[in-house]
Amino acid sequence: MALSTEDREEIKGMIKSVVNGKIDKMSEKLDAHILTLEPISEAIMWINSTRKFLLWSSAIVVSFISTITLFKYLK
């Protein structure tokens, strides 16, 4: 039993509306989830950049102190 062209078009339309509706709902949920996680991701980036700054600055201070100490012992 073959379907008529009208029936096929109607079925295609129903499938598209159902699938697109589900995709839209998933997209909305994903957008809400991304907005929820955005402050957390910004905080993590801030922590990482602060950590890098502290590592660099402490390395500079340690190298400076080591150089001063070395020159004191060489005198």
Image (tube, grey):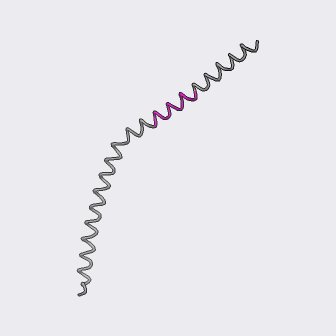
Q: Residue at x 42, y 38 (%)?
A: 42
Name the image quarter holding the N terminus.
bottom left
Name the image quarter holding the C terminus.
top right
Q: Is residue 21 above or below residue 38?
A: below
In the displayed structure image, the side of residue 53 where residue 17 appears, left or right: left
Say if the magenta span includes residue 35.
no
Between 46 and 65, the one lying in front of the other is 65
| Numbered range of the magenta stretch | 45-56
Between 8 and 60, the one lying in front of the other is 60
Q: Main secondary structure of the magenta part?
A: helix
Between 47 and 31, the one lying in front of the other is 47
Q: Position of residue 3 (x, y in %)?
A: 24, 84
Q: Residue at x 66, y 20 (%)?
A: 66
In the displayed structure image, the side of residue 47 where residue 56 appears, left or right: right
Say if the magenta span includes residue 50.
yes
Q: Is residue 41 above or below residue 30?
A: above
Q: Is residue 73 above or below residue 39?
A: above
Question: Residue 68 occupies which quadrant of the picture?
Answer: top right
Q: Position of residue 44 (x, y in %)?
A: 43, 37
